[in-house]
Image (tube, grey):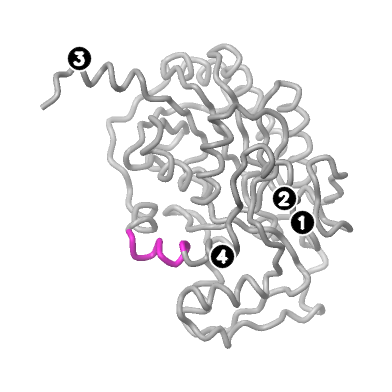
């Protein structure tokens, strides 16, 4: 057995990451995917949202003093924020309201904590900031989305870019942690696997990426110290219809339940996103890595039902919880 002094020395050489949003799809999956590369501490109010293999610190994210105390104690190299705006446009499209003030309060607290601790701050935001008419949106394209989430995303990005932070726009899918609503991808899987009708929109386009594939890109982006706005997402523009059909293939299903949603069934009150596909040329040039194809990601999504990944998200973690000083 290694001597405790040796272990302490090894732990001191491991880069530390402080992550918010372990209760979200993005946060929980990123924590699981990155825990073997970095020493991950999740930060939040509810200990039941902790992730196995990661430390946890209880904290009111809107309290700047509490967040600063945790950052001082953990001394992370990076702080990553996975708030409500880390959801994809397909998962946000049914939301008619958004707590912009609450999200901005959290971001302000995190920016202050990053400044005081010397950590780099990165935040995940949504492709819902866009809605067309372009086929692909670059980082500098006008953000024309008109939903409450789009307004909140623009406000968050303006604040972060004034603080030399990293803003990652994406369209993420994956398995949700316990106690959270099923994501769009999970709803499609449940309908297909149960032989139920699966109505989807053939006119709603995006560039989806599996959240654990995003973790690989984020690892590289943080390691090379990217700053500013970058689009990290899948390599292919696809409709909800193709996404569902390709998912059926990945799970070995026929896909005959995939049906086009008639235009008349669209709600006139939902935040409608016609085209949120993201141009990734800048990220590919900076990171020098290929982005995942749709079918590749969906096969990994299917594999996560049998390799223990999804089970880890649904199994409560057990920790000796710490509270901010």
* Left or right: where 213 falls relative to 108: left
Q: Residue at x 48, y 58 (%)?
A: 175
Q: Say the numbered circle drawn on residue 276.
A: 1
Residues drawn in magenta = 300-307
Q: Position of residue 21 (x, y in %)?
A: 52, 39
Residue 302, magenta (yes or no): yes
Gap in angstroms between the C-alphas marked 1 and 2:
6 Å
Q: Which mark is residue 185?
A: 4
Q: Quadrant of residue 114?
A: top right
Q: CA distance from mark 3 to mark 1?
A: 51 Å
Q: Residue 125 appears in which quarter of the rendering?
A: top right
As displayed, is residue 196 above or below residue 137?
A: below
Reply above or below: 4 against 182.
above
First in residue order: circle 3 vs circle 1: 3
**Can you name the residue that lies furthest to the left here?**
1
State yes or no: residue 164 in magenta.
no
What numbered label is drawn on residue 10?
A: none
- CA distance for labels 3 and 4: 46 Å
The residue mark sitting in front, 3 or 1, is 3
Q: Mark 4: few, some, or many residues within 10 Å (few <14, many ≥20)?
A: many
* 209 left or right, relative to 42: right
Question: What secondary structure is found at the residue carrying circle 1?
Answer: loop
The tag earlier along the polypeptide, 1 or 2, is 2
Q: Earlier in the sequence, mark 3 or mark 4?
A: 3
Q: Residue 75: where, in percent of width, then height? A: 45, 17
Which quadrant of the figure contains the N terminus?
A: top left
User: In what quadrant of the picture does the C terminus appear?
Assistant: top left
Q: Could you tell me residue 22's position as x and y percent?
A: 47, 41
Name the residue located 55 percent from the left edge and 32 percent from the top edge. 80
Marks 4,2: beta carbons within 8 A: no
Which residue is identified by label 2? 127
Label 4 element class: helix
């Amino acid at each position: 057995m290694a001597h405790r002094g040796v272990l302490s020395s090894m732990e001191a050489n491991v880069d530390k990451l402080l992550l918010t949003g372990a209760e979200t799809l993005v946060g929980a999956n990123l924590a699981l995917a990155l825990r073997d590369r970095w020493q991950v501490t999740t930060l939040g109010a509810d200990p039941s949202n902790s992730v196995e293999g990661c430390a946890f610190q209880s904290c009111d994210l809107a309290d700047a003093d509490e967040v600063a105390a945790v950052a001082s104690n953990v001394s992370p190299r990076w702080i990553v924020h996975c708030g409500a705006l880390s959801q994809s446009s397909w998962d946000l499209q049914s939301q008619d309201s958004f707590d912009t003030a609450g999200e901005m309060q959290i971001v302000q607290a995190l920016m202050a904590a990053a400044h005081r601790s010397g950590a780099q701050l990165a935040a995940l935001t949504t492709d819902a900031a866009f809605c067309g008419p372009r086929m692909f949106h670059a980082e500098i394209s006008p953000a024309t989305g008109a939903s409450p989430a789009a307004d909140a995303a623009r406000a968050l990005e303006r604040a972060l870019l004034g603080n030399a932070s990293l803003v990652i726009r994406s369209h993420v899918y994956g398995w949700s942690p316990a106690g959270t609503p099923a994501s769009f991808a999970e709803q499609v899987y449940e309908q297909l696997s149960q032989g139920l009708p699966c109505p989807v929109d053939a006119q709603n386009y995006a560039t989806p990426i599996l959240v654990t594939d995003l973790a690989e890109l984020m690892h590289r982006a943080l390691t090379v110290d990217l700053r500013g706005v970058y689009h990290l997402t899948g390599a292919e523009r696809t409709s909800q219809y193709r996404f569902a059909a390709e998912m059926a293939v990945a799970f070995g299903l026929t896909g005959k339940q995939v049906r086009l949603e008639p235009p008349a069934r669209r709600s006139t009150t939902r935040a409608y996103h016609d085209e949120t596909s993201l141009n990734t040329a800048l990220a590919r040039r900076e990171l020098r890595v290929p982005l995942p194809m749709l079918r590749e990601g969906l096969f990994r999504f299917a594999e996560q039902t049998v390799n223990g990944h999804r089970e880890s998200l649904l199994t409560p973690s057990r920790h000796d919880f710490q509270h901010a000083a």
